[in-house]
Image (cartoon, helix red, strand yellow):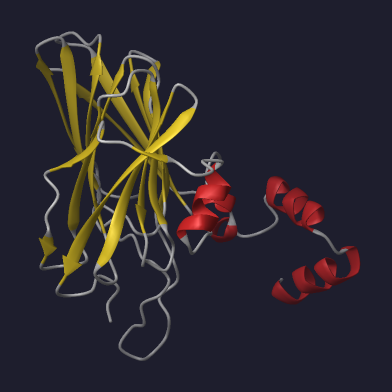
Amino acid sequence: MADPMKIRANLVGDSTEVKVLMSHEMDTGLVKDKSGKIIPAWWIQTVKVTHNDKVVLTAQWGTAVSKNPFMSFKFKGGAKGDKVTITWVDNHNDSRTDTAVIA
Amino acid sequence: MDMNRRQVLKTSGGATFLALLAAAGWIPSAYADAPGWSKAEFDTHTMDATLAALGAGKPVTSSDVAFFSTPDIAENGAVVPIGVTSKLPNAESIAILVEKNPFTLAALFDLPAGTEPTISTRVKMRETSNVYALVKAGGKYFMTSKEIKVTLGGCGG
């Protein structure tokens, strides 16, 4: 199981700004290790963000997203104390879900 | 297991059977893409191929799509901050494309109603390249581009 995401969700005016830092190697499958063997591609493919069970963002990622991915975006309609839940799934079908409370 | 799988593939032939196997969980999950991930769109290597796979045709160049917090020169190609924002009404999705990367499409964000068309993330860049922000709004595609110079490539080379 991967390390938890770091999620911040802050109310700015009438929008909620979400910032998330995920812990993932994001291997492209193009890099060789020291012994010359290709490190297989291993990366987060989909990300879903929900606010009180309503989807506010879905993303699909290629291998070009940097290691330990960062993402930020804003949505309208959040209130302090509401929950923002983020789930990612990688190409090993491993996944991780974390929740933050809007501050 | 591996031998069997190959034999099965040889004798039964065809992607449908492979898909069935994957669905049944007989193939190691390491080979299964995440549900909802579009291989057809990401497994493209040129701007034209990626735009075609996205169904974007020939996007209109628009000054209503803009980069923010995006450098002109990236010292480290492994971590290039990219911010994309759009003033177009009814934005449905934002895509980030790096022309000279091994795979052109870096990320695709779908924006439900109520989500603002402003996204930032970080991507890898193999070399100096044009980076494109593609926004789908009201069923049409709009694009803007920016050259980012990379002094150290992001693919371990």
Residue furthest out toward the right: B11
Quadrant position of the N terminus of chain B in the picture: bottom right
Instruction: Name the residue located 38 percent from the left edge and 26 percent from the top edge.
Output: B111
Residue A92 is at least partly visible in this image:
no
Q: Position of residue B134 (x, y in %)?
A: 37, 41
Quadrant position of the C terminus of chain B in the picture: bottom left
Residue A66 location, quadrant: bottom left
Instruction: Name the residue located 70 percent from the left edge and 73 percent from the top edge.
Output: B2
On screen, residue B31 versus residue A42, left or right, reads right
Instruction: Name the residue located 26 percent from the left edge and 72 percent from the top edge.
Output: B127
Tag count: 0
Q: Position of residue A43 (x, y in %)?
A: 40, 56
In the image, residue A87 above or below residue A2? above
Q: Nearer the viewer, residue A14 or B22?
A: A14
Q: Nearer the viewer, residue B103 or B68?
A: B68
Q: Position of residue A98 (x, y in %)?
A: 29, 32
Residue furthest out toward the bottom: A35
Q: Position of residue A29 (x, y in %)?
A: 43, 71
On screen, residue B154 versus residue A39, left or right, reads left
Instruction: Name the residue located 36 percent from the left edge and 77 percent from the top edge.
Output: A31
Residue B136 location, quadrant: top left
In the image, residue B34 above or below residue B113? below
Residue A9 is at least partly visible in this image:
yes
Q: Nearer the viewer, residue B121 or B105?
A: B105
In the image, residue B109 above or below residue A55? below
